[in-house]
Amino acid sequence: MGSQSGDKMEKMRMESRNITACNIALLGEIFPNCVAESKDKNGRPVLTVNMDVLRQMLTEETLPGDESYEFTWVGKKAAIAEAYKPIRKTLRPRIEESKAWDTTRNLYIEGDNLETLKLLQESYLGAVKLIYTDPPYNTGHDFIYPDSFKMDQEEYDSGTGYFDEEGNVNFRRENAVTRGRYHSDWCSMMYSRLLLARNLLADDGVILINMDEHEITNLQKICQEVFGESNDLGTIVWDKRNPKGDARAISYQHEYILVYAKNKSVFTERCKVQRPKKNARAILNKAAQLFAKVTDSYTLEDANAEFSAWMRLQNDFSGGEKAYNRIDENGNVYRLVSMAWPNKKKAPDDYFTPLIHPVTRKPCPVPDRGWRSPSATMRRMAQEGRILFGKDETTIPNSKYLLIDNMYENIPSLLYYGGSDVDMLAQMKIPFDTPKVVNICKEHIKSFTGKGDIVLDFFSGSATVAHGVLQANAEDGLDRRFIMVQIPEIIAENTQAYGQGYRDMCQIGRDRIIRAGERIKSETNADIDYGFRVFKVDDTNMKDVYYSPEEYDQKMLFLMESNIKSDRTDLDLLFGCVLEWGLPLSLPYRSQVIDGCSIHDYNDGDLIACFSETIPDSVLRAVAKRRPLRAVFRDGSFPDSPAKINVTEIFKHLSPDTRIKVI
């Protein structure tokens, strides 16, 4: 879009995107007869959906009171409305709390995650490869996220029909601890956040959610609605090897990790659900050490005997790993795999062609039910040296699998890990009682992400996921990036954390990332991005008059010096514009002074902003000559129509494709 003509410059919204309006507009493209124009409470025209017409469009027959299979609770509609309601908030940079602000591409955001997810909708729409999060388990004491749709007892009773029309009790109330409204609160909290989180996932993106027995059933149903049952990649059962000692019935010693894709068909086309073999590198290193010893006096047979004995002693190796117990003449580690048809029924006729022994030139025996692959594939495997023959044709050949070609394995549904990171955090002087296990996080991060991918955790806690990203990057150098979001939960005065000087959870999370980076750097000397930019959710940068100028008469406007709050800096305004224009928050920028005005160039011309109260033509021309994609100025910098016309004319001449907005 080119620069505007005339004196009417486009104003920035300075509030989160109205997702409801966007969805209605998309619906109107498919079913235009279902969308009509009406007026909002202020008399402004808005688009609305005629739900009766839409239902008729989607069904052959619509009957009043039709029953359907659905999962619902009191407050579900409010949760949907809350998710899509725009907010007048912003993210304010906190350079002093950041690490390597100028160079890092990682983010740490302090604030309510519902508001944060709304603010990130433009900048990270479809950009996140992995969401890995550990929400509150709703155990009765960990539910701290404030939501406007939480209900009191009266609202819950009304919604569930606890009283009839005459005020009589319809049913006996449940025990206060297990009452449905507590599940309703939790479901509403999760539903709204997952609706927004799904928008941020890439088409081949995945979400992993930790949960225990308290809300696993509800979480599964919510995920089926939000992500679609067809996008369920499976559930990992994590056996923690530690039964709960206070159980009155069955003692749970496991938790769950739900895994859903944004689009399973896209994910399976582009990605493999696999994890690195944990001990593969150690096996290769040992084999290389033994192969280097091979001489006339220490033969390859000797090396294989020692290698096989060493493998048998590795108690923590899986059976699949121990199968790679041979070294070939090139120093490659391999295993033998049967090439017999795996099913009980016989293979097709083409799967019975004999293999010719390379030495005797006689046919080898064929397995009773045939080969695993057709004859053309078998011949190609033989030519490539991927088939191991016996000394003569009397032995059925096997296929040869090299470990270096099979460094990954399928992710099993059972995860056994009984350890904890409490001791490690104590060494790092990070006071946190229930951290996720960083090695498990790292394993899943390496399994589901690749080079340059973004990993998001919007229930960051002690920032274990960020730690896992750093550890994974140090091991494979794939330069993943993280976005951590954490509400500044207040630290109780009677805790160890308070005694160490911590006042909220975000301070713990930031320190954990810094110290984890220092630990990884000292252990690996890896040259990776250890930094993070800190942002804080705050009220809008703009005064109320910015949004409702019609409510202020001309005399009042004259008395007001600016529509921007007095405590906001140029960087506050710059990143507010970055959010609205959908640019990532981690890009580089530079600032310079031209003729007394501060010019901020974000990502080499993606956006150039100047918020000076008076901007001379020389500065406007300097900005226009850089031909930025976008330019933002303070509306008050141009006192009248001729001044605004002058701006558009300068850009029309020097940079006609620049889009100009004002705040």
Image: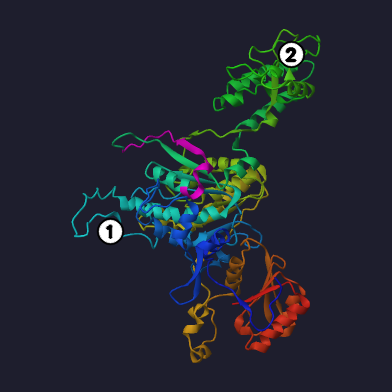
According to the picture, the residue beneath numbered tag 2 turns out to be: 354
Magenta residues, as a range? Answer: 225-246
Would you name the residue on which mark 1 appears?
Answer: 158
| Sequence order check, earlier mark of 2 and 1 | 1
The three-letter code of the residue at mark 2 reads Pro
User: Which residue type does callout 1 highlight?
Assistant: Ser
Magenta span contains residue 230 = yes
Helix, strand or loop at label 2? It is loop
Q: Which mark is residue 313?
A: none
> What is the spatial separation of the Cα atoms under label 2 and label 1, in whole angstroms?
76 Å
Q: Please, which residue is most extreme toward the top here?
A: 394
Q: How many marks?
A: 2
Q: Nearer the viewer, residue 233 or 370?
A: 370
**Residue 42 percent coordinates (x, y):** 45, 77
Residue found 64% across the figure and 11% down from its top: 368
Q: Return the x and y of residue 197 as percentages of the image width and height.
A: 52, 54
**Circle 2: is it few (<14), some (14-19), or many (20+) Cα within 10 Å?**
some
